[in-house]
Image (cartoon, helix red, strand yellow):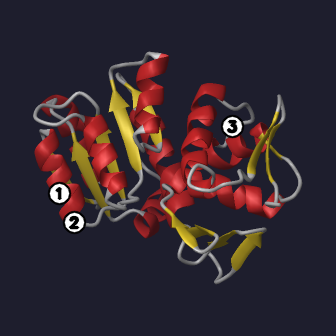
Amino acid sequence: MHNIDRDFCWSVRLKRLLIVEDNREIAGILFDYFESMGMEIDYADNGELGLKLASEHTFDIILLDLMLPRLSGLSICNKLRESGNNTPILMLTALDGREDILQGFEHGADDYLTKPFDLDILEARMHALIRRSNAEFVSQKLSYGDVSIDQKTRQAYRQGRFLALNPTTYTILELLLKKAPEVLTKEEIAFQLWQENDANNDVLRSHIYQLRTQLDKPFKHPVLVTVPKVGFRLEQTP
């Protein structure tokens, strides 16, 4: 039985869910669990249909299996991010190897859960993604040097150039801007992203890599600086 506060929290933040999962038993469990909360759910049992639905409709979050027929979950992630679709994606995977998980993040996923998983843990992870993706912000811009974000639209820019960030990398950049020029610790990032005090270094490193790909790679001078064993900070360009 879900308490009133929990149901209300979901009702105001999550309306529509896409499940892309070829295992009908798992999909059925997910469908029953979230439909009971009043969510509108779309379902695809293969990658091609999953990509079509994700591209043509608006969802609050996507639960995405990585091992799918016709088109892999990694390909779906990659194609969605390349098209500018920033819908939060939570990977559901039976592959729990370090490289498999990091590969998912590198293709644009925001979080992952290995099978078999606990439904309460899945719900909590989804809740965290929605909270940082769809939270209400005041209309305010933050900037440091030639980097800026609009907290209302959740859009980021450097030298006026739009940065295609997913919800997780946007959140990290926002935290960096709020702390600049001071150091943002790994523990601060872990708490904001996952409500945990200890950072998973491999996962965090993957998110930082994605952020650098947008924030530094296209430009002459990098602005995202690693502070060994501590965290990261922004610096102004010469």
Of labels 3 and 2, the one closer to you: 2
- Residue at the image point whose x is 57% and y is 31% from the top: 203
Choose the circle earlier in sequence order: 3 or 2. Answer: 2
- Local crowd size for mark 3, using a 10 Å CA cut-off: few (<14), some (14–19), many (≥20): few
In the image, is residue 98 above or below residue 175? above
- Most foreground residue, 45 or 36: 45
Q: CA distance from mark 1 to mark 3?
A: 33 Å
Residue under pointer 3: 196
SS class, disc 1: helix
Q: Are marks 1 and 2 in contact (CB under 8 Å)?
A: yes
Quarter assignment of residue 92: top left
Q: Position of residue 79 (x, y in %)?
A: 28, 49
Residue 57 numbered tag: 2
Residue 156 is marked as none
Of helix, strand and loop, which one carries label 2? Answer: loop
Q: Position of residue 160 (x, y in %)?
A: 60, 75
Q: Which mark is residue 53?
A: 1
Q: CA distance from mark 1 to mark 2?
A: 6 Å
Q: Tag 1: Cα neighbours inside 10 Å, few (<14), some, or many (≥20)?
A: some
Residue 6 pos. (x, y %): 50, 56
Query: Could you say whether the residue bearing mark 3 is in a helix, strand or loop?
Result: loop
Q: Amino acid at mark 1?
A: Leu
Q: Is residue 41 visible?
A: no
